[in-house]
Amino acid sequence: MTELHALLDAGLRPGVYRWGSSLPAEQVGRQVAAAGWGFVQLDTTGLVDKAGFLDVCATAFDLPRWFGRNWDALADSLSDRSTGEPELVLWDGWRELLDHDQDTVDVALQIFSEDTSESGQLRVFLREAEDAPDLVSNLPVV
């Protein structure tokens, strides 16, 4: 059993976590699906602003066409799509976006945190290198 599979089997609580892993996203998705969870790959590599982030969210979360591409719409859309089933969101590229637009990352983390406490559905993994500097020390590491 892999470390990720063990985390999922242990009933990882909803929340936002830092995760030091180099597993390819496709392999993460397969392991998550095998555990019976939903999987969302959120890759913001190369993005520099809120508009790009919201566009990636619209696609990654398969949000409805009416998604308004603003923070309130993202929060509403995430809660509207909640099925109550656990879902792992793998966020790659968040550090690069943080370098360009810290406000976007801060607000996104706030929305994800609020959704995890309201819907109990999301477990958001901020993927980072294991030796990366600690830029979000308030988040637990898995």
Image (cartoon, rainbow, N blue to C red):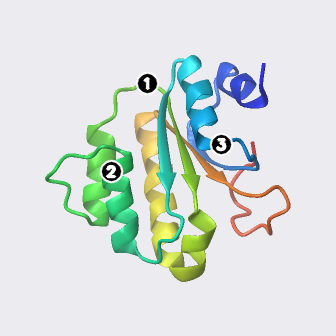
State the image coordinates of residue 6 (x, y, percent, origin top left). 74, 23
Amino acid, disc 2:
Thr
What secondary structure is found at the residue carrying circle 2? helix
User: Answer yes or no: do the residues labelled 2 and 3 have beta carbons within 8 Å?
Assistant: no
In the rendering, at what x and y percent does residue 12 appear?
A: 64, 30
* Mark 2 vs mark 1: in front: 2
Earlier-in-chain disc, 2 versus 1: 2
Q: Quadrant of residue 124?
A: top right
User: Looking at the rendering, which quadrant does residue 115 occupy?
Assistant: top left
Amino acid type at circle 1 is: Glu
Quick check: 89 above or below 74?
A: above
| In the displayed structure image, the side of residue 3 where residue 85 appears, left or right | left
Distance from the alpha carbon under mark 1 to that under mark 3: 23 Å
Res 18 label: none
Kindly state the secondary structure of the residue where label 1 is placed: loop
Using a 10 Å C-alpha cutoff, classify the residue at mark 1 as few (fewer than 14 neighbours), some (14 to 19) or many (20 or more).
Answer: few
Residue at x 72% of width, y 69% of height: 135
Neighbours of disc 2 within 10 Å: few (<14), some (14-19), many (20+): few
Location of the C terminus by quadrant is top right
| Mark found first going from the N terminus, 1 or 3 | 3
Residue sitting nearer the eye, 3 or 82 = 3
**CA gap, disc 2 to disc 3?**
20 Å
State the separation of the CA atoms marked 2 and 1. 20 Å
Q: Label 3 is placed on what type of residue? A: Pro
Q: Pointer 1 and pointer 3: residues touching (CB < 8 Å)?
A: no
At which x and y percent is residue 19?
71, 48
* Residue located beneath label 3 in the image: 24
Q: Are marks 2 and 1 in contact (CB under 8 Å)?
A: no
Q: Dot 3 lies on which element?
A: loop
Nearer the observer: mark 1 or 3; the answer is 3
Give the label on residue 85, or none. Answer: 1
The residue that label 2 is drawn on is: 59
